[in-house]
């Protein structure tokens, strides 16, 4: 058995970011417009602080304006909603991201719903969730978009393939299933109550694992040759008394069975911020009536893989919005 191709998400994310940076430069040059992304962090969770710093750095590297609002863990819901309202009204802010999770006194859904859907670069607002489900133009959650780009890079098109999404979160599982359905896959969503999970997984040509359970998916759960996308990032104790990151898939076992697999770290993770930057660029363009596609360099298509641009919303690649079968 040959080892699976390891999908280099780190390199692909760098390539997506470079494409975004080039388009931002063109947006500035031709339209005098600089996209702006503001991230709001409530509290001092160390992992969230690391994410927020990385987002800020990569936003600046892409040539965009980066705002960071750090609020104490004791912030009230009303104070956070007032901050969101201020950002909604600020024309220099095209993307707003409120880092999750939020402290217990704040209702996450109330905050997400208060963000202007046109600035909701996470794609979590009910308007964007609904528009994605309806096949309308939307801001689409970043991690599933990143997974889709990696799948397209490996598979080209994947209409008709059996896809299994393991996990039903609003951030990854549900939007991932919607995107795969839009690509005309036959989609199953599996979760904690699914009967005979290994047997369900073994049917899948595409397996996306997003449950946050370290190495839940074993090698013998995987269909030979399947493409495995591992969204899990789990910290587990290591032999040397320190800790290490593992995914939701047992990588060593999967390597011998899968056709291609994303590593952890260095697979899906870096794609999330890259797609956040792309969503911010898209939001800025739409706010000013500029077609995002108009910024793509003619040479881009030849020099870069076709999948580096998101072609989800071209009508001729999609089933019609109300297609029943
Ligand atoms: N926390 C972990 N991942 C995410 C994400 O993609 N968006 C937000 N807003 N918070 C997160």
Image (cartoon, rainbow, N blue to C red):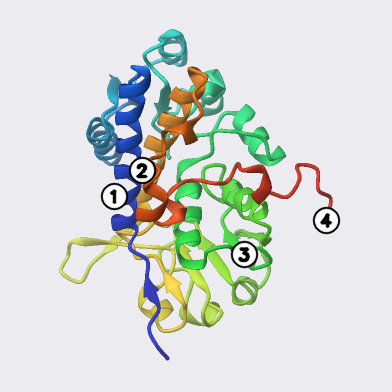
Question: How far is disc 2 from disc 1 in space, using C-alphas?
Answer: 8 Å
Residue of label 3: 163
- Most foreground residue, 264 or 10: 10
Task: Tell me which numbered mark, 2 or 3, is placed earlier along the sequence.
Answer: 3
* Up/down of 11 relative to 75, above or below: below
Question: How far is disc 4 from disc 2 in space, using C-alphas?
Answer: 34 Å
Task: Tell me which numbered mark, 1 or 4, is placed earlier along the sequence.
Answer: 1
Any mark on residue 274, and which?
2
Give the residue drawn at x 29%, y 39%. 51
Residue of label 4: 325
Question: How far is disc 3 from disc 1 in space, using C-alphas?
Answer: 27 Å
Q: Is residue 73 visible?
A: no
Q: Secondary structure at mark 1?
A: helix
User: Does residue 237 appear left or right of residue 16 in this picture?
Assistant: left
Q: Residue furthest left?
A: 240
Q: Secondary structure at mark 4?
A: loop
Task: Tell me which numbered mark, 2 or 1, is placed earlier along the sequence.
Answer: 1
- Most foreground residue, 58 or 317: 317
């Amino acid at each position: 058995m040959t080892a699976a191709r390891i999908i280099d998400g780190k390199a692909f994310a760098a390539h997506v970011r470079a494409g975004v940076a080039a388009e931002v430069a063109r947006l500035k040059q031709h339209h005098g417009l600089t996209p702006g992304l503001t991230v709001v962090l409530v509290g001092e969770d160390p992992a969230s602080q690391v994410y927020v710093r990385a987002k800020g750095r990569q936003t600046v590297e892409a040539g965009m304006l980066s705002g960071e609002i750090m609020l104490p863990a004791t912030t009230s819901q009303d104070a956070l909603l007032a901050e969101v309202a201020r950002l909604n009204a600020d024309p220099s802010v095209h993307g707003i991201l409120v880092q999750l999770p939020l402290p217990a006194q704040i209702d996450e859904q109330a905050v997400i719903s208060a963000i202007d859907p046109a600035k909701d670069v996470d794609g979590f607002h009910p308007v964007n969730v609904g528009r994605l489900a309806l096949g309308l133009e939307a801001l689409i959650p970043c991690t599933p978009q990143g997974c889709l780009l990696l799948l397209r890079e490996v598979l080209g098109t994947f209409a008709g393939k059996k896809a299994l999404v393991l996990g039903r979160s609003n951030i990854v599982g549900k939007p991932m299933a919607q995107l795969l359905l839009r690509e005309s896959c036959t989609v199953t969503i599996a979760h904690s109550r699914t009967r005979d999970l290994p047997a369900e997984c073994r049917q899948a040509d595409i397996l996306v694992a997003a449950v946050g359970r370290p190495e839940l998916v074993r090698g013998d759960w995987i269909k030979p040759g399947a493409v495995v996308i591992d969204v899990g990032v789990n910290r587990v104790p290591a032999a040397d008394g320190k800790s290490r990151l593992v995914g939701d898939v047992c990588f060593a076992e999967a390597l011998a069975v899968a056709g291609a697999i994303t590593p952890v770290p260095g697979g899906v993770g870096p794609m999330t911020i890259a797609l956040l930057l792309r969503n911010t660029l898209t939001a800025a363009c739409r706010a000013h009536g500029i077609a995002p596609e108009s910024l793509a360099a003619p040479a881009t298509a030849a020099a870069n893989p076709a999948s580096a641009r998101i072609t989800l919303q071209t009508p001729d690649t999609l089933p019609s919005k109300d297609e029943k079968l």
